[in-house]
Image (cartoon, grey):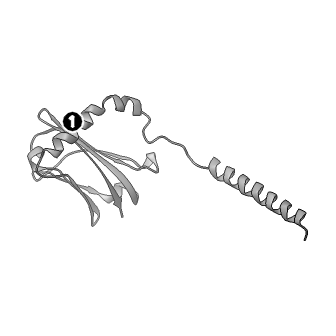
């Protein structure tokens, strides 16, 4: 085999590899993580205030994946008089698997959620609630088994 054939093989391999990458790239989805990002960006000061209010507390928010349940625990001092609260389980890889729930804690600040609502994988959990006039916000990631 002479050097001309070798150059032809290299060029052909390069062209086939490029066409393969174009095919794979065309099959990827380009969905945004949040369609209303601009509106939410304008309200981001509430999130900053909520995070600051949460860091001022002695207890912290915990999210634990246990036997058949996801256990959410918020500080007891804020759980007594929640006027409004939401839990948003955001699946970064697929928006259709997101879960929105109302925050309804018991007297210990705990809420238990059945894992049947979820698909196994990574979720970003955004907790927001209001106790009297103070807003609180927490964001964590969890891998649900």
In the image, residue 24 sits, relative to residue 39, either above or below, namely below
Q: Is residue 30 left or right of residue 139?
A: right
* Residue drawn at (77%, 60%) of the image: 13
**Residue nearer the viewer, 145 or 104:** 145
Residue on which disc 1 sits: 49
Which residue does the image show at 68% across and 50% down from the upper left?
A: 22
Residue 127 placement (x, y as % from top left): 25, 45
Relative height, residue 41 to residue 33 (above, below): above
The crowd level at tag 1 (other Cα within 10 Å; few <14, some 14-19, many 20+) is some
Residue at the extreme front of the image, as rendered: 3
In-front residue for pair 66/16: 16
10 with respect to 70 (left or right): right
Q: Which residue is painted at 12% across and 44% down in the image?
A: 78
* Residue 129 in sight from this viewpoint: no
Quadrant for residue 49, please give it: top left
In the rendered image, which quarter is residue 80 located in? top left
Q: Is residue 25 above or below residue 132?
A: below
How many numbered discs, if any?
1
State the residue at coordinates (48%, 40%).
32
Q: Is residue 50 visible?
A: yes
- Residue located farthest toward the bottom when viewing the structure as drawn: 1
Position in image of residue 1 (x %, y %): 90, 71
Q: Secondary structure at mark 1?
A: helix
Q: Nearer the viewer, residue 6 or 112?
A: 6
Is 5 on the left-hand or right-hand side of 135?
right
Residue 100: image location, x then y, percent: 32, 44
- Horizontal and vertical percent position of residue 58: 10, 50
The C terminus lies in quadrant: bottom left
């Amino acid at each position: 085999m002479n050097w001309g054939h070798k150059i032809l093989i290299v060029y052909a391999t390069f062209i086939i590899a490029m066409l393969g990458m174009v095919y794979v790239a065309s099959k990827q989805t380009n969905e945004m993580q949040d369609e209303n990002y601009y509106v939410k960006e304008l309200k981001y000061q509430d999130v900053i205030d909520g995070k600051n209010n949460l860091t001022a507390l002695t207890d912290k928010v915990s999210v634990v994946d246990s036997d058949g349940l996801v256990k959410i625990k918020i500080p007891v001092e804020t759980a007594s008089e929640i006027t409004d609260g939401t839990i948003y389980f955001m699946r970064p890889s697929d928006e259709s698997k997101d879960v929105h729930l109302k925050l309804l804690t018991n007297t210990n600040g705990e809420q238990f959620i059945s894992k049947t609502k979820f698909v196994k994988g990574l979720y970003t959990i955004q907790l927001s609630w209001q106790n009297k006039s103070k807003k609180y916000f927490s964001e964590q990631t969890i891998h649900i088994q």
